Each structure stands twice: as structure tokens, then as C-alpha cells.
Amino acid sequence: MIEKRTPLPVGEAVKRVMDYSITSQKEYVSIEMTNNRFLAEDLVATHDVPSFDRSPYDGYAIRSVDTTGGSSSNPITLQVVGEIGAGFVFNGTVEQGQVVRIMTGAQIPNGCDAVVMLEVVRELGNGNIELKRTIKKGDNISYQGEDTKKGTVLVEKGTRINPGIVALLATFGYSQVPVAVKPKIGVIATGTELLDVDQDLEPGRIRNSNTHMIMAQIDRAGGEPIYFGKLADDFDTCFGAISEILSKVDVLITTGGVSVGDYDYMPAILKKLGSDILFNKVAMRPGSVTTVATLGQEKIIYGLSGNPSACYVGFELFVRPVLQRAMYSKKPHHSKTKAILAVDFPKPNPFMRLVRSKLSNEGSRIHVAPSGLDKSGVVSSLSGADCLMLLPGGTRGYEKGMEIDVLLLEDQQGSEWPWNNIVPSYK
Ligand SMILES: Nc1nc2c(c(=O)[nH]1)N[C@H]1C(S)=C(S)[C@@H](COP(=O)(O)OP(=O)(O)OC[C@H]3O[C@@H](n4cnc5c(N)ncnc54)[C@H](O)[C@@H]3O)O[C@H]1N2
Ligand code: MOO
Ligand SMILES: [Mg+2]
């Protein structure tokens, strides 16, 4: 008799894994290694930027009062008393009728309150310049602190570091940066049919693609995969290997063997391990057989489906947010947005469908279409997928032109909780 499983709504299943959290420690890494890592502390401005008033142009630093009344019919002559490039400071104070030749980035000399660009003055060749206009106080000055003020929290702990954040880290002198330690995730494939990537095809057998895909997904999510190879569908072999791996990692992902087939040993292995099953059936397609179990307070075991598309979706929904939150992210889930359905989905389905899809700009609207064949066992639809359509179940199907929700796979912003208010559209 086949065991009866009760399907859990997708949001409820995600909530169950999120209730069981893991947390990363902090480590310091050199700034060159920080792109895509997660900040383990708030990034606070340790000084004003710029830290001194400076020139945004190549030109002359002047006293605006000296240009009063200046015009094409009343040119003003001023005396050049110095010259500074970026990195140099003019010593002394600029007096009435004097200017300093100044280059972009150099500190404004004492006494000056504006800059005129090189293009608007005439060099008279005798150490003087001529100016045919009146300049206002403050013209062409980048003031101290106009970019950012000392003490401002510029980036919150838990934010994924991007090139702009790297620029801030450098600006404030962080040569060693506090980041979250990457969670280490064990990955293992089960399936007697599986060949290694470098093996030739044999009758009835396929190459193991799932673990390689998942390791790339772990990397994309900011974690560190540890590959434990593949196992044949044999209870004792799988039980022994999985028990041993669990002593080495806090999170283990297995693929295959979670359904009800004769060689699907994961349910029995999880039982013998004494794990608590958070769920073993989710009201979603693909990935309905996705199983998540916990062992004590410390370990999570993900039994992802063997079917490639189901495996992929199971990771993005249930593993990724756990990794992101372990690294202090406040927005650990994929972000959700609206798009216009570009094709019909006439077939109703009792479960929510998560269709691997691609967005495109059509005029002013964003359209979404499947990125390939919408079947759980399909691998080719994954390469072009940048989002998952969310088509709630129990409807009479979906029609081209309807506005639907999609989860963005490549978006770095993330969301706090995308699983509310997913509105089913009706024909
Ligand atoms: N009688 C029923 N049969 C099935 C049900 C069901 O409810 N009743 N569920 C179906 C659904 S839905 C899914 S999804 C699959 C889940 O299968 P398993 O997780 O048990 O995975 P396997 O049986 O091991 O393999 C399924 C499929 O995937 C291929 N596979 C497995 N591992 C890999 C890998 N590492 N790389 C690439 N492809 C892999 C495998 O060869 C099979 O074709 O069960 C349905 N059946
Ligand atoms: O659980 Mo299966 O992935 O629905 O096809
Ligand atoms: Mg199976």
C-alpha cells in the first residue's frame, strides 16, 4: 500500500523551512574577495565624503566677490598666484584680485568660494586671466559631506556586496571586510541510472546533471557546495553514505528517490535516521514530491526530486531563502513582480504551477512566456529561465493577456515574503 501524503500549500511549506533557521558566523576577508559576499555588519560612513571642499572641474579657484559686475563689456582681470593638481594643497590664503589654477579633485584654497572652468577664461600670458562674467558664490564647488555625511548607515548588514558597495568599502578604508561565512551545503545524487559527466552514454542510463546544477545554484545563492558524488539506488549504501555525510555538514541536499517507486529509498532513509519530516508533498508543479526533514536542532536534509525541473524549483523555493537568511539577509526570498502572460494555459491544475519562464519587453509592458517545455523531467527549459510564473491552482486555466505574478530568479534585491496575495486569474 502506497503511503498517503498530504500536499501543503507552497507558502506554508516555505514557512516551515524558514521557521527552522541556520545562522552563519562572521569572518574577515580581503576587499578583493568581497563581491557577492554578504555584509556581516552595517557599513557606516567613517568620515564625510568628500572629506574637503574640492573642485569638480579643471579651472581657476576664485573669490566670487572679485567678479562682481564682470561681463563681456566689462572684463575682469585676475592674477594667477598658484597652481594645484589633485592631491596638492595651496598653502596660504588667496587675496583680493587673485586666483589659483586648480585641477579636478584638488582642495579649494583658503579664501576662494567658487571655480570657473578653463574654457570660460582667457589666459593673457602675463600671469593674469581675463573673465567676462559675474560668478556666484559656491559655483562649481563639491562641498565636504555632499556625497555622504560621517555616521550615515550606507548599507545594512545582510546585503549582498555589489561593485558599488565594494567602492564604499574602499572609500572608508576597509581592507579587511566583515562578511558572513558561506554556509556549506553537502550535495549528493541518488540513482543507479546516473553516469558521471565524463562518461559515455550507455543503454538506459543518463548523465547526472542535477548535482552540478544545484552546485551552481548554491553558488548563485551565495553558499559553498561540497560535492559527495552519486550513489546507486541501494538502501544500505545510501543510508550509510548519508549518515556519514550528515556528520560533516549542517545542510544536505539529495536528489532523486523521494517519490513512491520501488527504488525510491529517501523516505525510508529519513525515517531510519530519526529525522522529523517538515513536509513530503507540496501543492506545486513541478516539485510536488519535494521533501524536507530536520535532524535535531542543527541539520536540514532536503530530498529534492530527481526530475531536473522539479529539483531546480525545489532549490530556489526552499534552499535559497534559508541560505540567504543564514547570511543575515532581511529579504531572503526571490522578488515578485507582475507580467503579462504571452501564451494560453488552458489546462486547469489543482496545484500551483511554477513555470520556468523568460521575461521580455513588449512596448511598455513586461511579457512572460515559458522558456521551454513545461514538464518536470525537462532540462532544456532551465537554461533560458529568468523567472518562475506563479499560476495558482484550482482555476479554469489561464489565457494570453492576463496579468500574473512571477518570481525573479536573477534579481539581487530579494523580498521579505512573496507568498501573500498571489491572485489567481480566471478565464
Ligand atoms: N506513481 C507515482 N509515480 C511518480 C509520482 C507519484 O506521485 N506517483 N511522482 C512523480 C513526480 S511528480 C516526480 S517529480 C518524480 C520524482 O521522482 P524521484 O524524486 O523519486 O526521482 P527518481 O525516481 O530518482 O528520478 C526521477 C527522474 O529523474 C531522473 N534523475 C534522477 N536523478 C537525476 C540526476 N542527478 N540528474 C538528472 N536526472 C536525474 C531519473 O532518471 C528519472 O527520470 O516521480 C514521479 N513518479
Ligand atoms: O513533483 Mo513532480 O516534480 O510535480 O513533477
Ligand atoms: Mg522515483
Image (cartoon, rainbow, N blue to C red):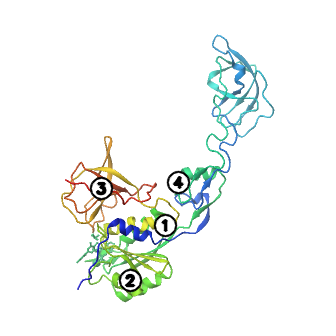
> Between tags 1 and 2, which lies in front?
2
The amino acid type, in three-letter code, at marker 1 is Gly
Residue 348, image x and y in percent? 20, 61
- Do the residues under discs 4 and 1 have CB atoms within 8 angstroms? no
Question: Which numbered disc, 1 or 2, marks the residue that appears first in the sequence?
Answer: 1
Quarter location, residue 8? bottom left
Could you give the CA–CA distance between mark 2 and mark 4, rounded to whole angstroms?
A: 39 Å
Residue holding disc 4:
162
Query: What residue is shown at x 76% (from left), y 21% (from top)?
Result: 97
Residue holding disc 2:
270
Question: Which numbered disc, 2 or 3, marks the residue that appears first in the sequence?
Answer: 2
The amino acid type, in three-letter code, at marker 2 is Leu
Residue holding disc 3:
423
Query: What residue is shown at x 50% (from left), y 77% (from top)?
Result: 298
Residue 392, image x and y in percent? 27, 60
Could you give the CA–CA distance between mark 2 and mark 3, rounded to whole angstroms?
A: 35 Å
Q: Secondary structure at mark 3?
A: loop
Quarter location, residue 128? top right
Query: What residue is shown at x 39% (from left), y 71% (from top)?
Result: 211
Q: Is residue 46 visible?
A: yes
Quarter of the rendered image showing ligand 2: bottom left
What crowding class fits label 4: few (fewer than 14 Cα within 10 Å), some (14-19), or many (20 or more)? Answer: some
Q: Secondary structure at mark 2?
A: helix
Residue holding disc 1:
223
Residue 207, image x and y in percent? 33, 73
